[in-house]
Image (cartoon, rainbow, N blue to C red):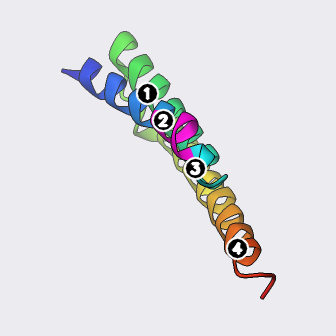
Amino acid sequence: MGYVYVVLWIGVGAFLIFRMGKESRVFYPIGGFFLLLGVWWAAGVYTGLNLFSGAWGWALRAVTAVTLVLACAEFIKDVRRTRGGK
């Protein structure tokens, strides 16, 4: 059942990057995060380890926080660009 999530996360990431990236650059870091999440989930399924707890879980939380900050910064730039610099 875990491989369903792997396919789901990689599919969502690819969709955000290749289809929605044309709409706005904010989708690139979010799509990249979903691709990473798919690889992360696949590694957990393949190795049998719980990569969502302990030190690995904190590493994923840190990557999630960095992705959120990058996406917010890109969103703010996009809003300012579309509103004419306000």
Where residue 59 appears, as percent x and y from the top left, is: 58, 41
Which amino acid lies under the numbered mark 3 shown in the image of this protein? Answer: Phe
Q: Label 4, on which residue?
A: 82
Q: Label 2, on which residue?
A: 13
Where residue 31 appears, as percent x and y from the top left, is: 54, 41
**Quick one: 7 or 27, which is closer to the camera?**
27
Q: Nearer the viewer, mark 4 or mark 3?
A: 4
Label 2: which secondary element: helix
Distance between the alpha carbons at the discs numbered 2 and 3:
9 Å
Label 3: which secondary element: helix
Which amino acid lies under the numbered mark 4 shown in the image of this protein? Answer: Thr
Mark toward the start of the polypeptide (2 vs 4): 2
Residue at image point 34% right, 22% down: 7
Mark toward the start of the polypeptide (4 vs 1): 1
Distance between the alpha carbons at the discs numbered 2 and 1:
5 Å
Distance between the alpha carbons at the discs numbered 2 and 4:
25 Å
Q: Label 1, on which residue?
A: 10
Please provide the residue range marked out in magenta: 15-20
| Main secondary structure of the magenta stretch | helix
